Amino acid sequence: MDGKTVRGARCTNGTQVHLLAAMTGTGLVTAQREVGSKTNEITVFQPMLTELDLTDTVVTFDALHSQQAHARFLVEEKNAHYIAVIKGNQPLLHQQMKQLPWRDVPLLGKTRATAHGRDEIRRVKTATVTRGLAFPHSAQAVQIVRRRRTVTTGKVTLERVYAVTDLTAEQAGAPEIAHRVREHWGIENKIHHLRDTAFAEDASRVRTGTAPRAMAALRNLAIGALRLTGCDNIAASLRTHSRDATRPLTTLGIT
């Protein structure tokens, strides 16, 4: 779950169109809703997911949506699981997470990756929640320590990220939880960035009524259709399809 502002599509009151989307791990958008100018993503979260079958699905989202009502909704009504990142917008819970005896918890996972000019090491610890953590259905507390070094300058930054999940240790170990937290941000590259670069969405001046949302949905459809054919390079596939008017119809199964 993540939101994106369509920067070129301003409404008559000057506000920009903001869309909340739900993406599968394979990069398919399964739901999308426009966020009203007088509200925020929190109010759209549950209505957008209501019609989806989320049984046994693990739902990830940023700290904005780490709300107790969302956790109850996912577990009690949708029979789903959640991994909720806890930051400063939940100050009491965030402080409680920081004060857990992490030094006594063994390191359960470590990964290293170099990309975009940064060398990053991630260390993850998880602790079973037995009592006292003020978040619905919480089963494990998570600490992820990110050590990033900028290759060109040698500058090192250290960040501690905390999360809570209803998944038990038997259902998901520390490496899997860390992987899911990292993969959450795949929506930026697989959908948001792709719509901007391959479709120039932020440059679009379409702004009348629901047209910006409809155009975003059509872009999602095109990306999803190409991914279902096994396409890895969306931009290259779009160029290939543009050379022959019959190719898009074939991809969509229209003959």
Image: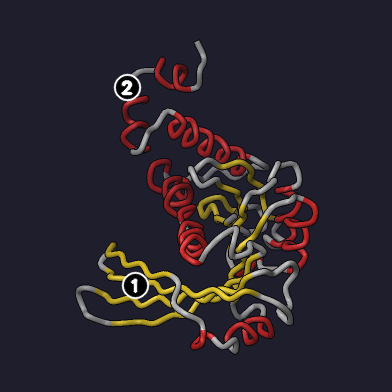
Is mark 2 in CB contact (under 8 Å) with mark 1? no
Residue shown at the point (45%, 72%) measured from the top left: 108
Q: Name the residue under label 2.
A: 243
Residue shown at the point (54%, 52%) measured from the top left: 6
Neighbor class of circle 1 (other Cα within 10 Å; few <14, some 14-19, many 20+) is: some
Residue shown at the point (31%, 35%) measured from the top left: 236
Image quadrant in which you'd find residue 246: top left
Residue 200 position, x and y percent, is 42, 45
Which mark is drawn over residue 160?
A: none
Q: Mark 1 points at which residue?
A: 121
Question: Residue furthest toward the front?
Answer: 170
Residue shown at the point (39%, 32%) measured from the top left: 230
Image quadrant in which you'd find residue 132: bottom right
Residue 80 position, x and y percent, is 69, 52
Q: Please, is residue 24 above or below residue 241 in the view?
A: below
Question: What is the C-alpha distance between the residues marked 2 and 1?
Answer: 44 Å
Q: Nearer the viewer, mark 2 or mark 1?
A: 1
Q: Is residue 23 left or right of residue 245?
A: right
For the residue marked with disc 1, what is the amino acid? Ile
Q: Is residue 53 left or right of residue 255?
A: right
Secondary element at tag 2: loop
Question: Residue furthest toward the top?
Answer: 255
Residue 3 position, x and y percent, is 58, 56
For the residue marked with disc 2, what is the amino acid? Arg
Q: Earlier in the sequence, mark 2 or mark 1?
A: 1
Question: Residue furthest toward the left?
Answer: 152
